[in-house]
Image (cartoon, helix red, strand yellow):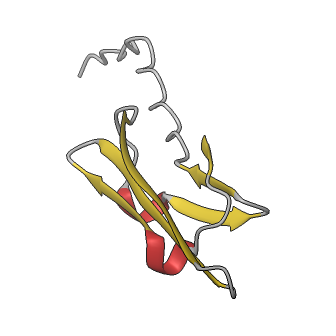
């Protein structure tokens, strides 16, 4: 599980999550504009920033199993780790019959 605090973004427009070649990539960009007009003058503020994070995934994680959710400013990405393959059983002895 990967959690990223991203308050004030619209996850559908401002964030992108991809999985390629065993790597999870999270990209997000935030932009805010504030304008204030008063008798004394005009004030304008711009705030913006972006980031990219890449996280290697464990072997065997399938792209289709990765899910993401966004709640209260926190993006949570889950990538379930597959069950390890059952260990090979010990060699079974095969009885030999005489004919």
Task: Give the vertical position of 75 relative to 79 (above or below).
Answer: below
What residue sits 38% from the left and 36% below the top? Answer: 57
Tell me what residue is drawn at x 30 percent, y 15 percent: 96
Pick the residue in front: 97 or 71.
Answer: 71
Q: Residue at x 72, y 59 (%)?
A: 73
Q: What residue is shown at x 52% (from left), y 39% (from top)?
A: 81
Please state the total of marks drawn on the protein image: 0
Regarding residue 77, the answer to whether it shows in the image is yes
Which of 46/37 is in front?
37
The quarter of the image holding the C terminus is top left
Residue at far front of view:
40
* Percent coordinates x, y for residue 60 in the rendering: 36, 40
Left or right: residue 66 versus residue 73 is left
Seen in the picture, residue 18 relative to 54 is either above or below; the reply is: below
On the image, the x and y values in percent for residue 87 come to 45, 21
Q: Is residue 1 visible?
A: no
Name the one closer to the observer, 26 or 92.
26
- Left or right for 51, reference 39: left
Q: Position of residue 97 (x, y in %)?
A: 31, 18
Considering every residue shown, the one lying at the far right of the view is 72
- Which quarter of the rendered picture does the N terminus lie within? top right
Relative side of 50 to 42, left or right? left
Q: Is residue 96 left or right of residue 61?
A: left
Residue 74: image x %, image y %?
70, 54
């Amino acid at each position: 599980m990967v959690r990223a605090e991203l308050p004030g973004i619209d996850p559908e427009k401002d964030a992108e999550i991809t999985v390629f070649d065993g790597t999870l990539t999270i990209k997000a960009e935030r932009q805010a504009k504030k304008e204030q007009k008063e008798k004394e003058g005009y004030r304008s503020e711009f705030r913006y920033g972006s980031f990219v994070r890449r996280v290697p995934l464990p072997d065997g994680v399938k792209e289709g199993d990765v899910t993401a959710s966004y709640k209260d400013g926190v993006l949570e990405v889950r990538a379930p780790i597959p069950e390890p393959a059952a260990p090979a059983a010990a060699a079974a002895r095969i009885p030999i019959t005489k004919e």
